Amino acid sequence: MTQIDQAVAIRDGEELDATTVDRFMKQAVPDLQGEPSIRQYPGGASNLTYQVDYGERSYVLRRPPFGTIAKSAHDMLREARVMKALRPVYPYVPDIVAICDDHEVLGCDFYVMERFKGIILRQDFPEDLTLNEADTRKLCLSVIDKLVELHRVDARAAGLDQLGKGAGYVQRQIGGWSNRFRKARTEDVGDFEAVMAWLEAKMPEDLAQCVIHNDYRFDNVVLNPDNPFEVIGVLDWEMATIGDPLMDLGNTLAYWVQADDDPGMQMLRRQPTHRPGMLSRDEVVEYYLERSGLQVPSFDFYEVYGLFRLAVIIQQIYYRYSQGQTKDPRFAGFGQAANYLEQRCQQLIKGSSL
């Protein structure tokens, strides 16, 4: 059995009151015994995720980050509702155990879900996961297949058809992310104006409307420890909505750093997409389009959009760091990362056929 993903010690300033958590958990799950062991998952730079254990019984608690956050961001209640609706038709969604909107408990909305015990691929493979090139490709295709499967979900049957705002998704995304960037920009980061102007000028019509994850990547996928080619869970549904599937794929590829990328892109790598056997970004697009039956003359717009959106997310976090709203040292270099992504977007635009 390959090593199961585990939480680690809680970061300074992000501790939870164990007594309060214990009281809430025993109200939600009355037969729990003993005191909880609480640890934190190291991945992610947005919502905070904790492992809460009572002996062999293990749960996951999700809450927003500490400090000042945008009013519409980190909506734990919405995320939990989406997961509850989606689970019957997409069984890779964790079961929701309890939802809390009483800020007297932890000072915020939060929810508790079941824990999928499996492998989560972060920056590199676990030491005991030894796959040859052919097996790595098989694993990669399995993960992409689950995104295709999600995009085939009948939103109306799941009761999620009202989750989105209808036609015009692409236009809303470009306008929305552009506004968010301008609000979060700091003086040491470029203005992205040329990138935003190009995206606005090249916007296609929505190709389709379906359930999209909006943050689908390897470290949000749980693999069976006895069979790493099998996806048993998909996590982090905060930004799920009804939207364009190719926008979702563009978001995924923004994190897809391949072996021949330049050093700047390699510095951003947070998943093992560089390994021999992993598909290149172009191969991912080709495979996805073949499996989904969708057609598009060029993927350039979606690739630039994904990188721009990632830059905005990074910049929003960096803005919070620069304002002293978070002290997490991981965020100190996020301004440099945003600057690199602006340059990369500009390079792609320069070489685009659009």
Image: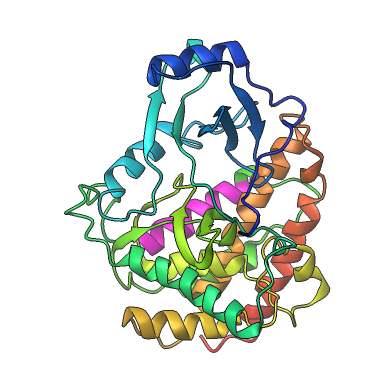
Name the quadrant of the N terminus. Answer: bottom right
Is 85 situated above or below 247?
A: above
Q: Nearer the viewer, residue 329 or 148?
A: 148
Is 54 situated above or below 151?
A: above
Side (left or right) of 301 relative to 345: left
Dividing the picture into quadrants, the one containing residue 178 is: bottom right
Q: Nearer the viewer, residue 177 or 117?
A: 117
Dividing the picture into quadrants, the one containing residue 257 is: bottom right
Q: Nearer the viewer, residue 78 or 129?
A: 129
In the rendering, at what x and y percent does residue 314 appear?
67, 51
- The residue depicted at 28 percent of the width and 64 percent of the height is 209
- The residue depicted at 40 percent of the width and 40 percent of the height is 79
Asked if the stretch drawn in magenta spans residue 181, the answer is yes
Side (left or right) of 315 relative to 236: right
Side (left or right) of 81 relative to 128: left
Q: Write down the region rendered in magenta.
A: 168-182
Asked if the stretch drawn in magenta spans residue 179, the answer is yes
- Determine if residue 299 is in view: no
- Determine if residue 87 is in view: yes
In the rendering, at what x and y percent does residue 173 appear?
44, 57
Is 305 situated above or below 53?
A: below
In the rendering, at what x and y percent does residue 181 appear?
61, 50
Extreme left residue here?
157
- The residue depicted at 55 percent of the width and 32 percent of the height is 64
